Amino acid sequence: MAEYVYGILEPAATAPAASGIAGAPLRVVGGDGAAALVSDVPAGELRFGREELLTHSRVLEAAIADGTVLPMRFGVVMEPTEVRKRLLESHGEALRAQLHELAGKVEMSVRVLYEEQPLMRGLVAQHREIAELRDRVALQAPDATYYERIRLGELVAEALERRREADAAELLEELSAVSLAVNVGASTHERVALSASFLVRRDGQDAFDETLERQAAARRDLMRFKCVGPLPPHSFVDLAAAV
Amino acid sequence: MAMTRGPGGGYVQRSGSSGLYEILDLLLDKGLVIDVFLRVSLVGIELLTVDARIVIASVDTYLRFAEAVNRLDLGNSEGEGLPDLVQDITEGGAESKSRGVLEGAKNALFGSDDEDEESEEESSDSGSGSRSRSRSRSGSSSRSRASRGRQS
């Protein structure tokens, strides 16, 4: 048997009321500076899918309702002795420090997306070069304008990137004022204006939500705001950094 | 797409823990990680460090942008638009270079059965192989900047 590790808890913590992977019971092991929340899984090769991901996520949600938890990445399976020695003992100080640092704090995951039509209209309106090239292209047959269309697209891409940087900077400024830390992800898609996680104190969550709502309302003609949380602080834990 | 107000009267779209798709990045890409000898396969995909996701601006991208601004004239419906990331992956954008373990995982897990709210962003077919333009990411996690906010 091996142990699937969901996260790190405070030493005196008890297992949350939830089931582990494949319905196995949760338990808490270790307990000097930090404890591990685990459940038994078969040793050997494991193939996990959506179900296990969901379980992992739900166990962490249950754990953070009870107290502080440092989430493991999905898929950490260890032999029981390894859990105690390589994880808890070797990294005891780092884990204890982070448990202390993150007590009473949660993660809010925010994604802001552009609506395509307003976005494109805005770029055309703000950039004469784009508007003029678009007009020239519109007057001709498509097969005569291949290179112009590439140039047009390139201008749009550049303008979009500048727009995104400006918008993201504004949003970060506003939301940084109501959060403790931010972890910004790369924008993986043209329509993503901002993708970021914010570390917020539980008692600071109302202020964060209000600010987010204000931004969403003010920008509703151009952007759509999505928020998930409060979450365990996935983006703000790190074994390496604290060593 | 009309900006409708949510149940609480707000404009922010919220999902609780059931929004697994929204936090997939966090579960697979963040969190504490330690070298382990026992390996978990995520639907057949090795859970190793996420590949460098270098996305290159391409002719395809530019042509799609040009099409998007040209379409404004014709007053096309909201239904046609730049493909969503999910759309990109499930359409199997032929020459997409942006596939890493994470996106492969999304594809494998969510495929065409996904009823998640992300599906409301999916546009109708765009046809061309799609790429998005973004900064490169390397190493075991996304290139992210952790910085201190002003709340103390």
Image: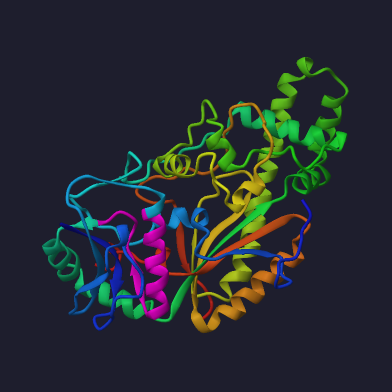
Q: Can residue B152 be spotted in the picture?
A: no
Q: Which of B38 and B67 is in front in this view?
A: B38
Above or below, comparing residue A231 to residue A2 in the picture: below
x, y percent for residue A203 = 52, 84
Residue A86 is covered by the magenta coloring: no
Residue B6, picture quadrant: bottom right
Q: Residue at x 80, y 32 (%)?
A: B70
x, y percent for residue A224 = 69, 57
Residue B97 as seen in the image, left or right of residue A97: right
Residue A195 as seen in the image, left or right of residue B63: left
Residue A235 as seen in the image, left or right of residue A168: left
Q: Give the range drawn in magenta.
A: A52-76
Residue A77, picture quadrant: bottom left
Q: Can residue B85 be spotted in the picture?
A: yes
Residue A190 as seen in the image, left or right of residue A203: right
- Residue extending furthest top? A143
Q: Which of B44 and A82 is in front in this view?
A: B44
Above or below, comparing residue A72 to residue A200 in the picture: above
Residue B3, picture quadrant: bottom right
Mainly helix, strand or loop, the magenta region?
A: helix
x, y percent for residue A205 = 56, 78
Residue A64 is covered by the magenta coloring: yes
x, y percent for residue A235 = 42, 63
Above or below, comparing residue A106 to residue A139 in the picture: below
